[in-house]
Amino acid sequence: MRILVAEDDRSSRLLLTAMLDGLGCQVDLAENGREAVEAVRLMRYDLVMMDLHMPGLGGAEAASAIRALSGRRAAIPIVVLTGDPFEDTVERCLAAGVNEVIAKPIAEAKLQAVIAKWTKAGLARVGSSRQDDQPRSHGRELAARLGATVFQEIAAHFLEDAPRYLAELERAAASAAMDDVAFHAHRLAGAAKTFGLGELAERGRTILDACHDRADAKARDLVAGTRGILDHALAQLSEECRDIQAPAVGARGKGGSPQ
């Protein structure tokens, strides 16, 4: 089964890829909506999974462009992942031709259900999973599921990217570019959820809510108080990374824990 994943955040992209790889899927990657549309035009996929907020062309806009293609490619199932599943957001995605909108972070059981629902192959060629639907967002749970090496790589991306996300968020707030504030808050919150960094994820979501409600002054005030929360989250994740022993190269089974 071949799946296209379009996601601009490196840690989220690697996590979803590792989960799909562990289920036996072949995964191709795109970093934005334009790349996703071009990939669908050139290749045949069973399913497209896209982040909603991506630079240049977001998930809803990319879905609309895919639906405008000719032939069977226009009918490919499209699932959008988002950290802000507001009712109007879902309606906008469905109107653009998206088949389903899923809240981030996605649990493995939910991921399997999505594959089964929207592809003909269903689960015939993917592995089994736990029966609970709780996101495996805590660092140690991720390391146990994906292996310490993959976890360390995902965490390294977040530790490098998160300060940049916040700097971009602060610049957008300073210039009152509220659409950009919402974009960067969504990106920061979504990445934080991956690691169970609840306070940081909640702050990003609260900023996003304020932008959605057009409470611009409140959103900017929230942004101003986010740096201390980010510093605490990065320290928490760094400590988890130190506690999780990465195995020697080649010691990790595919998509699993150290052997």
Image (spheres, rainbow, N blue to C red):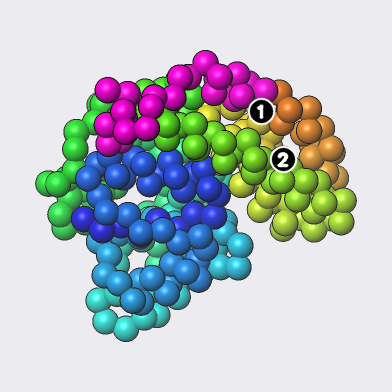
The three-letter amino acid code for the residue at tag 1 is Leu
Can residue 133 be seen in this snapshot? no
Q: Read off the residue under disc 2.
A: 163
Q: Is residue 52 above or below residue 248?
A: below
Q: What residue range appears in magenta?
A: 234-259
Tell me residue 51's x, y (percent).
Answer: 49, 54
Q: Nearer the viewer, residue 4 or 148?
A: 148
Q: Residue at x 26, y 58 (%)?
A: 2
> Which residue does the image show at 31% across and 28% down from the upper left?
251
Asked if disc 2 and disc 1 are in contact, CB closer than 8 Å, the reply is yes
197 displayed left or right of 31: right
The amino acid type, in three-letter code, at marker 2 is: Pro
Q: Is residue 228 left or right of residue 41?
A: right
Mark drawn on residue 70: none
Dot 1 lies on which element? helix
Q: Where is residue 66 shown, x and y percent of the image?
A: 40, 73
Counting from the top left corner in percent of width and height, residue 54 is at 57, 59
Determine the residue positioned at 54% across, 34% down: 155
Q: Give the quadrant of residue 259.
A: top left
Judge whether 88 appears above or below 61 on screen.
above
User: In the shown orientation, is residue 152 left or right of residue 132?
Assistant: right
> For mark 1, what is the residue?
234
Would you call the spot at circle 2 few (<14 residues within 10 Å), some (14-19), or many (20 or more)? some
Relative horizontal placement of residue 121, taking residue 31 as reference (left or right) = left
Q: CA separation, marks 2 and 1?
A: 9 Å
Q: Residue 130: percent from the left, percent from the top?
A: 26, 26
Q: Is residue 100 magenta?
A: no
In the current view of this chain or complex, which residue is farthest to the left? 124
Q: Say which element carries label 2.
A: helix
Residue positioned 33% across, 76% down in the render:
42
